[in-house]
Image (tube, rainbow, N blue to C red):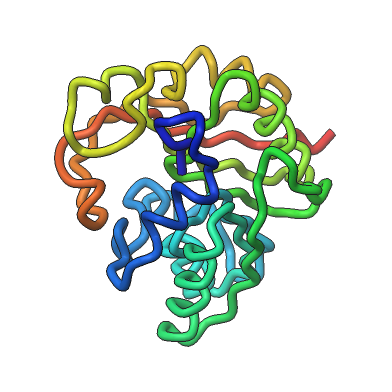
Amino acid sequence: MSLPPKAESSPASFWDSRFGQQTYVYGTEPNAFLVRQRYRLDPGMEVLAVGDGEGRNGVWLAQQGMRVSSVDASAEGVKKALRLAVDRGVSLSAHCADVTAWDWPQGAYDALAVVFMHLPPDQRPAVHQQMAAALKPGGLLLLEAFRPEQLALTSGGPKDAALLYSADLLRQDFADLEILELAEAAPTLDEGPFHQGPAATLQLVARRPVG
């Protein structure tokens, strides 16, 4: 989830418009980076899918036996996430909320999954701090985001450089976490009609210290 390209359009209305169609515009299958991190996750974990859109990642996590909550600004996205959960026979606790104003739970989750959620510089650091604080000691942050090289590609993502992330930016925002993995990746996306083809991303795995 990224903010809309025009300032006069609110994030919620932009995403409601995009998600307000029958098709799952980013598909119904989970993000490939998240799937590769499955070995770090155990059934029964409390997991939050942030900016979960139409629910593909939150529902997949629930299918792995985790207790999953999701949050997204779009009411249309949340409705589709809940419908997908029913279709897949799993339980999902979905919240419609703007993450920049949400009352974030503190120390509540074993893991956070944050896939392609892009925020502007004036909001990003505070939200990332809230994400870190939402983790239990030892909890994991699993994040994939587009980097500036994505501007030259056609596989999706924000077209505003200010909304794209660098490795140094993520190290700074998540300075209180232990970085386990931070890589510049070049995946080929196959995630519904809006994410297709070669991409330039960052893939982060970080852990909240126990002590």
**In which quadrant will I find the C terminus?**
top right
115 lies above or below 49: above
Residue 60 position by quadrant: bottom left
Q: Residue at x 59, y 41 (%)?
A: 141
Where residue 91 appears, as percent x and y from the top left, is 58, 80
Q: Nearer the viewer, residue 180 or 150?
A: 150
The residue at the far front in this view is: 8
Residue sitting at x 45%, y 17%: 162
Q: Height in image: 37 above or below 157?
A: below
Residue 66 in percent (x, y) is at: 59, 69
Relative side of 30 to 99, left or right:
left
Residue drawn 20% across the image and 38% down it: 155
Q: Nearer the viewer, residue 93 or 113?
A: 93
Question: Whole-percent x and y of residue 150?
Answer: 27, 25
Residue 205 percent coordinates (x, y): 52, 36
Q: Nearer the viewer, residue 98 or 87?
A: 98
